[in-house]
Image: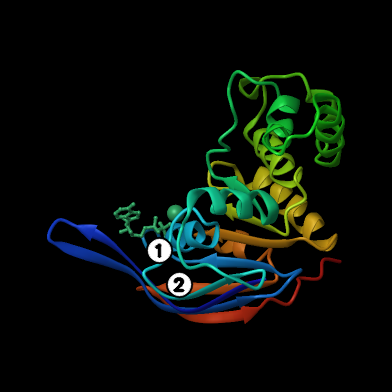
Amino acid sequence: MIKIKGLHKSYPMGKDSLHVLKGLDLHIKEGEFVSIMGSSGSGKSTLLNIVGLLDIHDEGEYHLNGQLIEKLDEKKAAILRNKFLGFVFQSFNLISYKSAIENVALPLYYAGVSRKERLKTAMDYLDKVGLKEWANHLPNELSGGQKQRVAIARALVTKPKVVLADEPTGALDSTTTDSVMDLLKEINDEGMTVFVITHEEEVAEQTKRVVRLKDGVIISDEVITPKVTV
Ligand code: ADP
Ligand code: MG
Protein backbone atom coordinates (compact mmCIF):
# COMPACT_ATOMS: atom_id res chain seq x y z
CA MET A 1 0.00 0.00 0.00
CA ILE A 2 2.81 2.37 1.01
CA LYS A 3 6.30 1.72 -0.31
CA ILE A 4 9.09 4.14 0.54
CA LYS A 5 12.71 3.78 -0.45
CA GLY A 6 15.63 6.05 0.36
CA LEU A 7 13.37 8.98 1.17
CA HIS A 8 14.97 12.37 1.87
CA LYS A 9 13.37 15.66 2.77
CA SER A 10 14.90 19.03 3.62
CA TYR A 11 13.35 22.40 4.32
CA PRO A 12 15.04 25.62 3.23
CA MET A 13 16.42 27.56 6.20
CA GLY A 14 17.79 30.90 5.07
CA LYS A 15 20.93 30.16 3.08
CA ASP A 16 21.07 26.61 4.44
CA SER A 17 18.58 23.82 4.63
CA LEU A 18 17.28 21.62 7.40
CA HIS A 19 17.72 17.96 6.51
CA VAL A 20 14.78 16.25 8.26
CA LEU A 21 14.39 12.82 6.62
CA LYS A 22 17.70 11.19 5.78
CA GLY A 23 16.99 8.08 3.77
CA LEU A 24 13.91 6.22 5.01
CA ASP A 25 12.84 2.79 3.86
CA LEU A 26 9.34 1.75 4.86
CA HIS A 27 6.81 -0.72 3.51
CA ILE A 28 3.28 -0.82 4.83
CA LYS A 29 1.01 -3.55 3.54
CA GLU A 30 -2.72 -3.41 3.17
CA GLY A 31 -4.47 -4.05 6.49
CA GLU A 32 -1.56 -3.09 8.75
CA PHE A 33 -1.94 -0.97 11.91
CA VAL A 34 1.35 0.90 12.19
CA SER A 35 2.59 3.68 14.43
CA ILE A 36 5.52 6.00 13.89
CA MET A 37 7.12 6.99 17.18
CA GLY A 38 9.63 9.74 17.68
CA SER A 39 10.29 12.78 19.78
CA SER A 40 8.98 16.20 18.82
CA GLY A 41 10.79 17.53 15.76
CA SER A 42 11.99 14.12 14.62
CA GLY A 43 10.17 14.43 11.29
CA LYS A 44 7.01 12.40 11.92
CA SER A 45 4.62 14.97 10.47
CA THR A 46 7.00 15.58 7.58
CA LEU A 47 6.79 11.88 6.75
CA LEU A 48 3.02 11.76 7.13
CA ASN A 49 2.59 14.83 4.93
CA ILE A 50 4.62 13.15 2.20
CA VAL A 51 2.69 9.90 2.56
CA GLY A 52 -0.55 11.95 2.52
CA LEU A 53 0.42 13.82 -0.67
CA LEU A 54 0.37 17.12 1.17
CA ASP A 55 4.08 17.60 0.51
CA ILE A 56 6.70 16.11 -1.79
CA HIS A 57 10.01 14.42 -0.98
CA ASP A 58 13.36 15.59 -2.44
CA GLU A 59 14.98 12.22 -3.09
CA GLY A 60 14.02 8.58 -3.02
CA GLU A 61 10.90 6.76 -4.14
CA TYR A 62 7.36 6.71 -2.88
CA HIS A 63 4.72 4.38 -4.25
CA LEU A 64 1.13 4.72 -3.05
CA ASN A 65 -1.03 1.73 -3.97
CA GLY A 66 1.47 0.84 -6.70
CA GLN A 67 1.58 4.33 -8.14
CA LEU A 68 4.91 6.18 -8.22
CA ILE A 69 4.56 9.66 -6.72
CA GLU A 70 7.01 11.96 -8.47
CA LYS A 71 5.67 15.45 -8.17
CA LEU A 72 2.80 17.15 -6.51
CA ASP A 73 0.43 18.28 -9.21
CA GLU A 74 -2.26 19.62 -6.86
CA LYS A 75 -5.18 18.47 -8.99
CA LYS A 76 -3.83 14.94 -9.33
CA ALA A 77 -2.82 14.82 -5.67
CA ALA A 78 -6.32 15.86 -4.62
CA ILE A 79 -7.84 13.07 -6.71
CA LEU A 80 -5.48 10.49 -5.21
CA ARG A 81 -6.11 11.80 -1.69
CA ASN A 82 -9.88 11.60 -2.14
CA LYS A 83 -9.61 8.11 -3.56
CA PHE A 84 -7.12 6.50 -1.19
CA LEU A 85 -6.58 8.53 1.98
CA GLY A 86 -8.46 9.63 5.07
CA PHE A 87 -6.90 12.13 7.48
CA VAL A 88 -7.21 12.57 11.23
CA PHE A 89 -5.38 15.40 13.02
CA GLN A 90 -4.54 16.26 16.62
CA SER A 91 -6.65 19.42 16.46
CA PHE A 92 -9.64 17.59 14.88
CA ASN A 93 -9.94 20.23 12.10
CA LEU A 94 -13.73 20.24 12.21
CA ILE A 95 -15.63 23.16 10.72
CA SER A 96 -16.96 25.02 13.73
CA TYR A 97 -20.21 26.31 12.20
CA LYS A 98 -21.22 22.97 10.75
CA SER A 99 -22.97 20.22 12.70
CA ALA A 100 -21.36 16.83 13.29
CA ILE A 101 -23.28 15.24 10.44
CA GLU A 102 -22.46 18.09 8.04
CA ASN A 103 -18.77 17.78 8.92
CA VAL A 104 -18.85 14.06 8.20
CA ALA A 105 -20.79 14.59 4.97
CA LEU A 106 -18.42 17.26 3.60
CA PRO A 107 -15.95 14.97 1.77
CA LEU A 108 -18.93 13.44 -0.05
CA TYR A 109 -19.96 16.89 -1.22
CA TYR A 110 -16.54 17.27 -2.86
CA ALA A 111 -16.95 13.81 -4.33
CA GLY A 112 -20.19 14.95 -6.00
CA VAL A 113 -22.60 12.79 -3.99
CA SER A 114 -26.20 14.01 -3.75
CA ARG A 115 -27.28 15.70 -0.51
CA LYS A 116 -29.72 12.96 0.44
CA GLU A 117 -27.13 10.24 -0.10
CA ARG A 118 -24.45 12.30 1.72
CA LEU A 119 -26.53 12.71 4.84
CA LYS A 120 -27.58 9.07 4.87
CA THR A 121 -23.98 7.84 4.55
CA ALA A 122 -22.73 10.40 7.09
CA MET A 123 -25.33 9.18 9.59
CA ASP A 124 -24.21 5.59 9.08
CA TYR A 125 -20.64 6.59 9.93
CA LEU A 126 -21.69 8.68 12.92
CA ASP A 127 -23.56 5.62 14.12
CA LYS A 128 -20.43 3.54 13.61
CA VAL A 129 -18.42 5.84 15.90
CA GLY A 130 -21.25 5.89 18.46
CA LEU A 131 -22.44 9.46 17.86
CA LYS A 132 -25.79 9.11 16.11
CA GLU A 133 -27.51 11.10 18.84
CA TRP A 134 -25.04 13.94 18.40
CA ALA A 135 -25.54 14.37 14.66
CA ASN A 136 -27.05 17.85 14.86
CA HIS A 137 -24.66 19.27 17.46
CA LEU A 138 -21.91 21.73 16.66
CA PRO A 139 -18.29 20.80 17.40
CA ASN A 140 -18.12 23.15 20.41
CA GLU A 141 -20.97 21.17 22.01
CA LEU A 142 -18.90 17.97 21.86
CA SER A 143 -16.10 16.71 24.11
CA GLY A 144 -12.59 16.26 22.74
CA GLY A 145 -13.07 12.52 22.33
CA GLN A 146 -16.39 13.04 20.57
CA LYS A 147 -14.83 15.60 18.22
CA GLN A 148 -12.13 13.11 17.29
CA ARG A 149 -14.80 10.46 16.66
CA VAL A 150 -16.53 12.86 14.28
CA ALA A 151 -13.17 13.46 12.57
CA ILE A 152 -12.63 9.70 12.27
CA ALA A 153 -16.12 9.26 10.79
CA ARG A 154 -15.27 12.03 8.32
CA ALA A 155 -12.00 10.28 7.42
CA LEU A 156 -13.87 7.04 6.73
CA VAL A 157 -16.85 8.36 4.84
CA THR A 158 -15.16 8.22 1.42
CA LYS A 159 -14.04 4.61 2.08
CA PRO A 160 -10.29 5.30 1.84
CA LYS A 161 -7.67 2.55 1.64
CA VAL A 162 -5.53 4.12 4.35
CA VAL A 163 -6.29 6.29 7.37
CA LEU A 164 -3.43 8.65 8.28
CA ALA A 165 -3.61 10.03 11.81
CA ASP A 166 -1.15 12.68 13.04
CA GLU A 167 -1.12 12.64 16.86
CA PRO A 168 -4.85 11.77 16.95
CA THR A 169 -4.83 11.55 20.74
CA GLY A 170 -2.48 14.47 21.38
CA ALA A 171 -5.26 16.69 22.71
CA LEU A 172 -7.06 13.98 24.70
CA ASP A 173 -6.82 12.64 28.26
CA SER A 174 -5.75 9.04 28.79
CA THR A 175 -9.23 7.48 29.05
CA THR A 176 -10.39 9.22 25.88
CA THR A 177 -7.10 8.30 24.22
CA ASP A 178 -7.83 4.63 24.87
CA SER A 179 -11.33 4.86 23.44
CA VAL A 180 -10.09 6.60 20.29
CA MET A 181 -7.35 3.98 19.89
CA ASP A 182 -9.98 1.23 20.41
CA LEU A 183 -11.99 2.77 17.60
CA LEU A 184 -8.94 2.82 15.28
CA LYS A 185 -8.29 -0.80 16.22
CA GLU A 186 -11.86 -1.72 15.36
CA ILE A 187 -11.51 -0.02 11.98
CA ASN A 188 -8.27 -1.90 11.39
CA ASP A 189 -9.97 -5.18 12.38
CA GLU A 190 -12.42 -4.52 9.56
CA GLY A 191 -9.49 -4.39 7.14
CA MET A 192 -8.51 -0.72 6.99
CA THR A 193 -4.82 0.17 6.83
CA VAL A 194 -4.16 2.58 9.71
CA PHE A 195 -1.03 4.69 10.05
CA VAL A 196 -0.71 6.62 13.31
CA ILE A 197 1.90 9.16 14.34
CA THR A 198 2.55 9.62 18.01
CA HIS A 199 5.16 10.59 20.56
CA GLU A 200 3.33 8.64 23.29
CA GLU A 201 4.51 5.13 24.13
CA GLU A 202 1.03 4.15 25.43
CA VAL A 203 -0.48 5.02 22.07
CA ALA A 204 2.17 3.23 20.00
CA GLU A 205 1.78 0.03 21.99
CA GLN A 206 -1.91 -0.11 21.08
CA THR A 207 -0.98 -0.54 17.42
CA LYS A 208 0.43 -3.71 15.82
CA ARG A 209 3.75 -2.43 14.59
CA VAL A 210 5.95 0.37 15.92
CA VAL A 211 8.47 2.17 13.73
CA ARG A 212 10.86 4.48 15.59
CA LEU A 213 12.26 7.59 13.97
CA LYS A 214 15.33 9.39 15.28
CA ASP A 215 17.63 11.96 13.69
CA GLY A 216 15.96 11.44 10.33
CA VAL A 217 16.34 7.67 10.13
CA ILE A 218 14.37 4.63 11.25
CA ILE A 219 16.12 3.13 14.27
CA SER A 220 13.75 0.23 14.88
CA ASP A 221 10.73 -1.47 13.39
CA GLU A 222 8.98 -4.06 15.56
CA VAL A 223 5.81 -6.08 15.60
CA ILE A 224 3.83 -5.68 18.83
CA THR A 225 2.49 -8.75 20.53
CA PRO A 226 -0.95 -7.88 21.85
CA LYS A 227 -1.33 -7.68 25.62
CA VAL A 228 -3.68 -10.29 26.97
CA THR A 229 -5.96 -8.95 29.67
CA VAL A 230 -7.51 -11.51 31.95
P1 ADP B 1 7.43 16.03 14.36
O1 ADP B 1 6.10 15.87 13.70
O2 ADP B 1 8.13 14.75 14.58
O3 ADP B 1 7.34 16.83 15.60
P2 ADP B 1 8.06 17.67 12.03
O4 ADP B 1 8.06 16.75 10.88
O5 ADP B 1 6.85 18.52 12.22
O6 ADP B 1 8.38 16.85 13.36
O7 ADP B 1 9.30 18.64 11.93
C1 ADP B 1 10.63 18.17 11.77
C2 ADP B 1 11.57 19.36 11.66
O8 ADP B 1 11.31 20.08 10.47
C3 ADP B 1 11.41 20.36 12.81
O9 ADP B 1 12.68 20.86 13.14
C4 ADP B 1 10.54 21.44 12.19
O10 ADP B 1 10.81 22.68 12.79
C5 ADP B 1 10.94 21.42 10.74
N1 ADP B 1 9.86 21.78 9.83
C6 ADP B 1 8.66 21.15 9.73
N2 ADP B 1 7.90 21.70 8.77
C7 ADP B 1 8.64 22.71 8.23
C8 ADP B 1 8.43 23.66 7.18
N3 ADP B 1 7.28 23.67 6.47
N4 ADP B 1 9.42 24.54 6.91
C9 ADP B 1 10.58 24.52 7.60
N5 ADP B 1 10.85 23.65 8.61
C10 ADP B 1 9.90 22.76 8.92
MG1 MG C 1 4.19 16.41 14.29
| Ligand 1 contact, mark 1 (Cβ < 8 Å) | yes
Label 1 crowding class (10 Å Cα cut-off): few <14, some 14-19, many 20+?
many
Label 2 crowding class (10 Å Cα cut-off): few <14, some 14-19, many 20+?
many
**CA gap, disc 2 and disc 1:** 8 Å
Question: In front here: 112 or 186?
Answer: 112
Question: In front here: 187 or 210?
Answer: 187
Image quarter of the C terminus: bottom right
Where does label 2 land, which residue? Answer: 213
Considering every residue shown, the one lying at the far left of the view is 15
Q: Which x, y percent locates residue 106?
A: 68, 32
User: Can residue 167 be seen in the rendering of this structure?
Assistant: no
| Ligand 1 contact, mark 2 (Cβ < 8 Å) | yes
Question: In front here: 84 or 124?
Answer: 84
For the residues bearing labels 2 and 1, Cβ distance under 8 angstroms: yes
Q: Is residue 219 above or below residue 144?
A: below
Question: In front here: 116 or 164?
Answer: 116
Left or right relative to 106: residue 213: left
Q: Is residue 213 above or below residue 55?
A: below
Residue at figure coordinates x 83%, y 37% from the top left = 130
The amino acid marked with disc number 2 is Leu
Where does label 1 land, which residue? Answer: 43
Left or right relative to 210: residue 193: right
The amino acid marked with disc number 1 is Gly
Q: Secondary structure at mark 2?
A: strand
Q: Which x, y percent locates residue 109?
A: 71, 32
Q: Quadrant of residue 36?
A: bottom right
